[in-house]
Image (spheres, grey):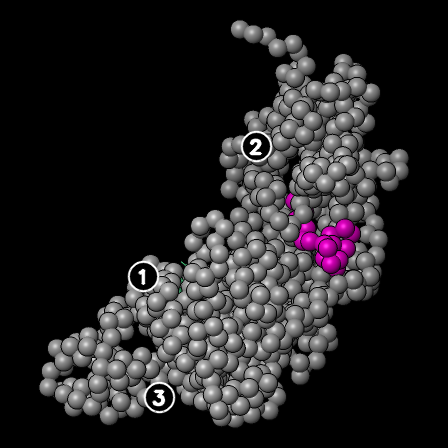
Amino acid sequence: MLKKVPADIDALKTIDDKLRWLSAWTIHHANHIRESADGLKVGGHQASCASMTAIMAALYFHALGPNDRVAVKPHAGPVLHAIHYLLGSQTLEQLKNFRGFGGMQSYPSRTKDKIPVDFSTGSVGLGVAITAFASLVQDYLAAHGMMEEADRGRFVALIGDAELDEGNIYECLIEAYKHDIRNCWWIVDYNRQSLDATSADRMFERFDEIFASCGWRTVELRWGKKLAAALAKYPVLGEWLEELPNADHSALLYQGGPAWRARIGADLGKKADAFLKSHDDEALVVLMSDLGGHCMETLVEVFDAAQDDVPTLFVAWTVKGFGLPFAGHKDNHSGLMNPTQGQTLRDSMGIKDGEEWEPLAGIGGNARAGVEALIERSRIAREKRERSFGKIDIPAIPAPQGEEQSTQAAFGRVLLDLAKSGAPLADRIVTTSPDVTVSTNLGAFVNQRGLFKRREMADVFAKAKIPSAQKWSATNQGQHIELGIAESNLFLMLAALGLSGDLFGERLVPIGTLYDPFIARGLDSLNYACYQDARFLLVATPSGVTLGPEGGAHQSINPPLIALGQPGLRHYEPAFADELAAMMEEAFRLIDAPDGESTYLRLSTRSIDQVERADDGWKEGALKGGYWLREPGINAEAAIVAMGALMPEALAAWEELSADIPGLGLLSVTSPDLLHRGWTAAQAQRWGGSREPSHVEQLLSRLASGAGLVTLCDAAPASLSWLGGVLGNRVAPLGVERFGQTGSLADLYAAYRLDGAAITEGIAELLLPQTSS
Ligand SMILES: Cc1ncc(C[n+]2csc(CCOP(=O)(O)OP(=O)(O)O)c2C)c(N)n1
Ligand SMILES: [Mg+2]
């Protein structure tokens, strides 16, 4: 840790005021001053900002070091921008364009904001949990010699109190405890208000215990120094205040001095006389608002006292809307000052008309020098960190050999071969799985590369010579991070691993596995990972009704549709092992490429005959989303279009039908996602002049105009049926639309119309003359 300079409390307080002003003014300007082209309310959260400015001033201008990373509560985004404005790393133009096109974003965004944002936030709860996983990644990198111990930083989450209702926080807390995470500060802005209401008093008493039982130190910042002194002098007032319900407290903070006086007088009678006499109404408001989260002395003191690496929860009592006209009002979440209130606030801050944007307006004389010195001293990064790409040597990934293989088994073999090869890529791979490592075929990789644990853990079964296929000892050199069954944690782990290049300058190659249907379980966390452009490979297996006897509860139906609508994630669904190998190689490349993305491989446990290839001509098409596995004849009237594990049915039907239907083609779709994207991208190009036909258009143009397509996939049929819209082909869509059930593949394919008979019927439907009844 760097040596600390003693805090300049006065300057910090001035900065607190400045942040409150600038964040409020930025929002005010966007709503009341900036020209509105469409009359829509712009919005913003002045109250949510105001309750955090002291906490953020104490952090960014005192406690944070250059290697610390912060997830800022989404609605306090404008405070972060105000901080960078004071530091000179945010422009006036950006502040003026808050929530405008290309301007600073409503909620901190790693990818879109111009200032350094360590973690995007917006979907509450996720920004909190990712800090714990990022601290684990830091431990991983340090243990693997990819970063210096001394460069380790702290991971700070600034949390709204209502955010603590999000279940993902507790899933993360449990996982974090198992991994003995450290260097985390979670700071709760305990303003006791959410969007709709004031927070339940009862629950808050429990948070301490929950965190403490997971190894966290908890620190409560309840009263500020002045209020604490007053309560020490008048203990009866202290007892009364401790018991005051959240809703009453908020209402009194909103109503002001006379209301406090009346209520204290009514509740305490003569016992409060001395206290009330010694405070006029204005003094009462100031005193009763002196909560720990607004008291700079308290904030500096608790942050300075927590310099070890023990994870710490700070509960900072605050007033939502502190210092603003709607302070404490239960409806203030989206409250905006009106123009008159804006002017009054400006005047109260000593800022002249026209100087609203002046960073240090209203600060005179000696105070200004102190503030300037403090701004100069802040150790946080002012520039966005460079992203780390293009540094990993990606070897060719050969296809596993074998006449009959499943894509899931082939995945395990590719990883095993990589682990044994000693290629530098293998050293960058980190695998992780929510308790399905073995059943998703990661086991062999883990046998080679071991579990990661900061503290060594012997494989008790191996030591006792009990036979087992899994020989898993854990060391700090291991490369597999074991997770409990909480899929949201998997995606947050992948998000943190997938940002390692951005956060720490060392890119890892994260691979996460889970069962395909359980993507839905962690979907928002997956979206969150993609939103930040974290890079990883997600392997979802098994999938579809093809997992047969496992039954309906494990059979996925809609993930290809999810992938079709998910930016930043490329869906590949291979049928054969050589396709899988090519896709994995591509996925590794995409992880390490500036214009890359993450990849989702949807795999199967079904072992199928591999096809003979004359050459590598299929590969390019397979990586673009599809290729003709059986070329169509000139002006073919029909084609079978199939994806993934159902390819044997498609091939058999093709064999059977092609005698009767000359030129029948078989199109293997490896990524509906890429085909669709290519199609829409080509459409968008048209407006710019000449346009290249997209890959899917090129594929389908091989058929006669208006030819029929029977589409077949072990997923929602809409995954492929849209292909008919590209060139106007008629489509008979086959796929799964009902929940699955147990059974053999033959039973299930017949029941769900995924078999040869269904394909034949589909073709007949398309080719026979339409009869009218
Ligand atoms: C997952 C999710 N659900 C709902 C919302 C909408 N929302 C935004 S803020 C908020 C309440 C936040 O209250 P709190 O965390 O206490 O923040 P503060 O009082 O500091 O504004 C809600 C429900 C959201 N952003 N994310
Ligand atoms: Mg709140």
Disc number for residue 225: 3
**Image quadrant in which you'd find residue 664:** top right
Q: Is disc 3 surrounded by few (<14), some (14 to 19) or many (20+) residues within 10 Å? A: some
Helix or strand or loop: what does disc 3 sit on?
A: helix
Image position of 499 (left or right of 694) = left
Inspect the image, locate mark 2, and give the three-letter code of the amino acid beneath it.
Answer: Val
**Image quadrant in which you'd find residue 605:** top right
Q: Specify whether residue 600 is painted magenta.
A: yes
Q: CA distance from mark 1 to mark 2?
A: 47 Å
- Mark 2 vs mark 3: in front: 3
Inspect the image, locate mark 3, and give the three-letter code of the amino acid beneath it.
Answer: Lys
Image position of 152 (left or right of 653) = left
Disc number for residue 209: none
- Mark 1 vs mark 3: in front: 1
Q: Position of residue 476 (x, y in %)?
A: 67, 73
The residue nearer to you, when weighing 452 against 201, is 201
Q: Position of residue 280 (x, y in %)?
A: 21, 85
Helix or strand or loop: what does disc 2 sit on?
A: loop
Residue wearing tag 1: 331
Helix or strand or loop: what does disc 1 sit on?
A: loop
- With respect to residue 362, does 512 lie above or below? above
Q: Earlier in the sequence, mark 1 or mark 2?
A: 1
* Residue 608 in sight from this viewpoint: no
**Disc 2 within 8 angstroms of ligand 1 (CB):** no
Instruction: Give the residue at x 44% y 59%.
Output: 31
What segment carries the magenta color? 585-604
Whether pointer 2 and pointer 3 mark residues with C-beta atoms closer than 8 Å, the reply is: no
Residue wearing tag 2: 736
Q: Quadrant of ligand 1?
A: bottom left
Instruction: Give the residue at x 43% y 69%.
Output: 24
Q: CA distance from mark 2 to mark 3?
A: 65 Å
Inspect the image, locate mark 1, and give the three-letter code of the amino acid beneath it.
Answer: Asp
